[in-house]
């Protein structure tokens, strides 16, 4: 490696992107192409960056397996930023294995962090936790150590272990300052702001207020009966009844939870849960059936008593009932939750992350676009969707279990 390439690599590691391009901008040898590609990616020219990295990987000789693997890892990071979740993960794993076999410890760790970030996006928390546990942050350079702590914080935020997340973000901020990379410091600051932003609404005893993430953690750890509209479950401590696939039952449970300790008239239950505008005897018969099903489902946690006008929720072994609602009531809140990270998503990537069909996601995007809540860039396969800030913390709307799930 010549001195100019070495100087460009050092400038890139220090976050001096223009300095990197100044040294290798006119060169077309494989190392220069790879460095230009990485610099262009950090400047936001992602498509051009992918072209340069692929050209560099193809130009490296058969004895330069490590360099080719590094190009693959860089391309995988671009795919993650672009939310191209269908990018072949096997290529990243093969590159990581090649780097590990050749003793490239730092790039091996970087590749592993990319895998873990992908699992985190897809809600595969067990795999993410096992993966991060195999990595030792101590010998990592400051920039990679900050990235490591951001992953730890991301797992903590999504698991609602907020103390762990806060400590990780403190370490990440310290490492980012040492690295001197402004973009990394901004990323840590953005992640830290999540802990200070309203994450949900608490509806209890006829009142409503916003909750921070640590307050949500405290509520879910208490003995209160919680009707969780973010995950569509009813829970008390570690006892959880999921109604995610039974929307009518969950709508009834939420109505009863919001009215506790009072009751809810039958006509109100039918209007909110079934959408009945003109109630007749068939609607009342259906309500009795659905209440019976809900009573059976909630048997470990609560009973449902018939009253003169309607029905009332009676919790077992609990003196408090609370409804945990999303920060905004929105039919497609989960889609907005992903888009609120500020990145541009394709509809296919959203479908993968949500575990929904592409057609369902596209319908949701079209509805949100018609109301001006999201906007699209490009057309056809290049079309991407995003939402302008300010958004809201996505934690409680993204896939994956909460504590005790």
Image (cartoon, rainbow, N blue to C red):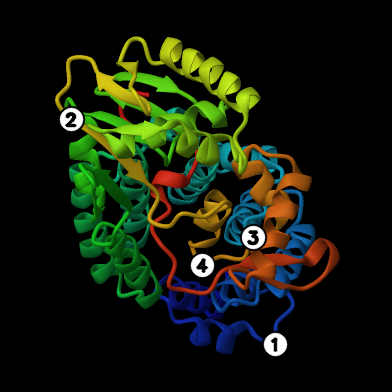
Q: Residue 29 vs residue 186: left or right? A: right
Q: Which residue is mark 1?
A: 26
Residue beneath the point at 55% across and 81% down = 4
Report if residue 116 is visible in the image. yes
Percent coordinates x, y for residue 391 in the rendering: 44, 66
Between the C-alphas of marks 3 and 1, the distance is: 33 Å
1 or 4: tag closer to the N-terminus: 1
Neighbor class of circle 4 (other Cα within 10 Å; few <14, some 14-19, many 20+) is: some
Between the C-alphas of marks 4 and 3, the distance is: 9 Å
- The disc placed on residue 345 is 3
Question: Which of the pair 358/139 is nearer the observer?
Answer: 358
The correct choice, above or below, for 188 with respect to 136 in the image is below
1 or 2: tag closer to the N-terminus: 1
Q: Secondary structure at mark 3?
A: loop
Question: Which of the pair 266/242 is nearer the observer?
Answer: 266
Q: Residue 275 vs residue 164: left or right? A: right
Q: Quadrant of the C terminus?
A: top left
Neighbor class of circle 1 (other Cα within 10 Å; few <14, some 14-19, many 20+) is: few
3 or 1: tag closer to the N-terminus: 1
2 or 3: tag closer to the N-terminus: 2
Q: Which residue is mark 2?
A: 320
- Indicate which label's residue lies in the foreground, 4 or 2: 2
Between the C-alphas of marks 1 and 2, the distance is: 69 Å
Residue beneath the point at 20% across and 51% down = 166
Q: How many marks?
A: 4
Q: Secondary structure at mark 4?
A: loop
């Amino acid at each position: 490696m010549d001195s100019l390439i070495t100087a460009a690599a050092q400038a890139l590691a220090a976050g001096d992107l223009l300095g990197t391009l100044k040294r290798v901008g006119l060169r077309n040898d494989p190392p220069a192409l790879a460095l230009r590609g990485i610099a262009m990616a950090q400047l936001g020219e992602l498509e051009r960056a992918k072209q340069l990295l692929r050209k560099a990987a193809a130009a490296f000789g058969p004895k330069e397996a490590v360099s080719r693997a590094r190009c693959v890892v860089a391309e995988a990071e671009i795919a993650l930023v672009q939310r191209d979740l269908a990018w072949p993960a096997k290529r990243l794993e093969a590159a990581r294995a090649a780097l590990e076999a050749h003793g490239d410890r730092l790039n091996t760790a970087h590749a592993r962090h990319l895998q873990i970030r992908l699992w985190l996006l897809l809600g595969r928390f067990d795999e993410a936790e096992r993966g991060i546990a195999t990595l030792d942050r101590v010998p990592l350079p400051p920039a990679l150590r900050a990235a490591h702590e951001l992953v730890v914080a991301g797992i903590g935020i999504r698991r609602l272990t907020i103390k762990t997340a806060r400590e990780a973000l403190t370490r990440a901020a310290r490492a980012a300052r040492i690295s001197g990379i402004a973009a990394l410091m901004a990323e840590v600051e953005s992640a830290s702001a999540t802990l200070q932003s309203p994450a949900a609404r608490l509806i209890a005893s006829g009142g409503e207020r916003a909750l921070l993430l640590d307050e949500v953690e405290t509520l879910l750890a208490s003995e209160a009966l919680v009707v969780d509209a973010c995950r569509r479950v009813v829970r008390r401590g570690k006892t959880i009844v999921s109604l995610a696939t039974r929307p009518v039952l969950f709508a009834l449970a939420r109505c009863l939870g919001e009215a506790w300790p009072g009751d809810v008239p039958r006509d109100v239950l039918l209007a909110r849960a079934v959408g009945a505008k003109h109630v007749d005897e068939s609607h009342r018969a259906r309500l009795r059936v659905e209440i019976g099903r809900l009573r059976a489902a909630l048997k470990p946690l609560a009973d449902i008593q018939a009253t003169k006008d309607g029905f009332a929720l009676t919790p077992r072994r609990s003196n408090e009932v609370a409804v945990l609602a999303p920060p905004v009531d929105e039919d497609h809140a989960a889609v907005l939750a992903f888009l609120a990270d500020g990145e541009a998503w394709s509809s296919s990537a959203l479908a993968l992350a949500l575990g929904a069909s592409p057609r369902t996601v596209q319908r949701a995007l079209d509805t949100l676009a018609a109301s001006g809540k999201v906007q699209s860039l490009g057309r056809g396969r290049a079309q991407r969707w995003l939402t302008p800030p300010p958004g809201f913390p996505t934690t409680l709307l993204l896939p994956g279990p909460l504590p005790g799930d």
